[in-house]
Image: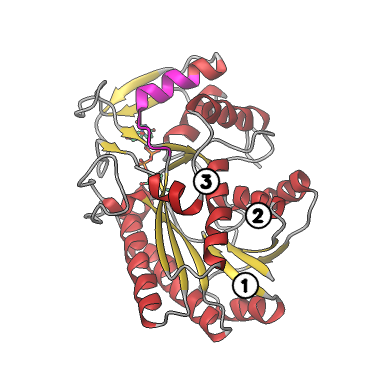
């Protein structure tokens, strides 16, 4: 029995494939490579000494999905595939709703046709909007998302919830990621964004490697200790391990489960800059710029439920996250 990983060539997907293979699972990857390189899968094979099968294709393509399910013996799906740029989603809502929503509907319909009803969905803390409580537990009400990307995550959570409620043969785990950073400690895999990075850590590492001149800090007038935005950064290897633990839960027949995958600690933008400088010895020049539309002041998790029910907790600290992000970038200045 194999695990189908959609979007498995991407940042979180490829790191999850490493941990799945290391845990003894058979892994099949489907990825359209629109925002990923197939080289990431070569690195997965290199680091694990194991093979995985790759299908190049899109979750919107019913034919390729049927081919995968007819050819492979799939027990569960970990669904990462989707467009994920907050800024781009504001400019291209139709593309985001079509790709992320229609694509997922196509995927789960084909799953149902092949009687595969176990899915782990890559969701996001963004579904909490401007959170009603801090630290955020899974009981915190979902909020008003500030962009179409976030709405696709929130809507897909509802869609998968309704599917499971209508047919209890479905087992659904919704994993709400906080802010994934870091890289495989080997430096052979990492975050590989197209173009100018939207997210903080890849922007910092590109400043550190000399590809970008200086960091713009989006606002220093938030109601936080130093005025800059606070987030719950989590090492991508911890995140990958959370998926392995969630698979075990899925196999026991979980019905519908929702988990925050975070560290429970919030760090400001300046905290990240200072910890990156401590971890690497590299000075990061920055300027304060206006707030970014859609940003919230503070977002960090209470991850007790995942610890209690999955036996999972984050182990890597902020200095290791900074160290590993830099180790990847300095060894791969142009990415894959
Ligand atoms: C973090 C902090 C910025 C860049 C989003 C999505 C989330 C997930 C991760 C996809 C904020 C500040 C950033 C920069 C800055 N999505 N910042 N200068 O916005 O918390 O989360 O990305 O994988 O679902 O919502 O992450 O890294 O963009 O920002 O000052 O050049 O860094 O204002 O306070 P965010 P981020």
What residue occupies the far front of the structure in this picture? 308
Residue 8 image position (x, y, % from top left) = 60, 57
Name the residue carrying label 1: 75
Name the residue carrying label 3: 239
Residue at image coords 65%, 33%: 185
Counting residues from the N terminus, which is met first, the one under dot 3 or under dot 1? 1
Image vertical order of residue 19 relative to residue 287, above or below:
below
Q: Kindly tell me whether mark 1's CB lies below 8 Å from ligand 1.
A: no
Counting residues from the N terminus, which is met first, the one under dot 3 or under dot 2? 2
Q: Measure the C-alpha gap from mark 3 to mark 1.
A: 21 Å
Q: Measure the C-alpha gap from mark 3 to mark 2.
A: 12 Å
Work out whether residue 221 or residue 157 is closer to the camera in this orientation and state it: 157
Q: Is residue 108 left or right of residue 2?
A: left
Is the residue marked by circle 1 packed among few (<14), some (14-19), or many (20+) residues within 10 Å? some
Q: What SS does tag 1 mark?
A: strand
Name the residue carrying label 2: 20
Q: In this view, does 335 lie to the left or right of 110?
A: right
Quadrant of the image containing the C terminus:
top right
Is residue 191 visible to us here? Answer: no
Work out whether residue 301 or residue 54 is closer to the camera in this orientation and state it: 301
Is the residue marked by circle 3 packed among few (<14), some (14-19), or many (20+) residues within 10 Å? many
Is the residue marked by circle 2 packed among few (<14), some (14-19), or many (20+) residues within 10 Å? many
Region of the chain picked out in magenta, as a range: 263-276
Q: What SS does tag 3 mark?
A: helix
Residue 312 image position (x, y, % from top left) = 51, 46
Image vertical order of residue 121 relative to residue 259, above or below:
below
Task: Tell me which image quadrant ligand 1 sits in.
Answer: top left
Is residue 32 visible to us here? Answer: yes
């Amino acid at each position: 029995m194999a695990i189908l990983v959609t979007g498995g060539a991407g940042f979180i997907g490829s790191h999850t494939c490493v941990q799945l293979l290391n845990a003894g699972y058979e892994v099949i990857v489907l990825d359209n490579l629109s925002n990923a390189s197939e080289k990431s899968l070569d690195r997965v094979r290199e680091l694990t000494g194991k093979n995985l099968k790759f299908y190049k294709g899109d979750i919107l393509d019913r034919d390729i999905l049927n081919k995968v399910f007819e050819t492979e013996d799939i027990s569960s799906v970990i669904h990462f595939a989707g467009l994920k740029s907050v800024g781009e989603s504001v400019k291209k809502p139709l593309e985001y709703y079509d790709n992320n929503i229609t694509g997922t509907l196509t995927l789960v319909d084909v799953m149902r046709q092949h009687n595969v009803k176990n899915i782990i969905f890559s969701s996001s803390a963004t579904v909490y909007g401007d959170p009603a409580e801090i630290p955020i537990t899974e009981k915190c009400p979902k909020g008003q998302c500030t962009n179409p990307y976030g709405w696709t995550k929130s809507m897909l959570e509802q869609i998968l919830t309704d599917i499971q409620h209508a047919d209890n043969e479905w087992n659904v785990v919704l994993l709400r990621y906080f802010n994934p950073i870091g890289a495989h400690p080997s430096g052979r895999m990492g975050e590989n964004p197209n173009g100018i990075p939207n997210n903080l850590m890849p922007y910092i590492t590109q400043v550190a490697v000399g590809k970008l001149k200086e960091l713009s800090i989006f606002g220093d007038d938030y109601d936080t200790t130093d005025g800059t935005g606070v987030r719950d950064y989590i090492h991508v290897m911890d995140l990958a391990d959370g998926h392995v633990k969630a698979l075990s839960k899925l196999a026991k027949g979980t019905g519908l489960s929702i988990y925050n995958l975070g560290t429970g600690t919030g760090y400001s933008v300046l905290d990240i800059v200072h910890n990156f400088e401590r971890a690497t010895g590299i000075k990061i020049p920055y300027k304060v710029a206006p707030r970014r539309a859609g940003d919230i002041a503070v977002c960090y998790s209470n991850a007790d439920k995942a610890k209690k029910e999955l036996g999972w907790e984050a182990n890597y600290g902020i200095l290791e996250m900074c160290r590993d992000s830099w180790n990847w970038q300095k060894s791969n200045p142009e990415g894959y």
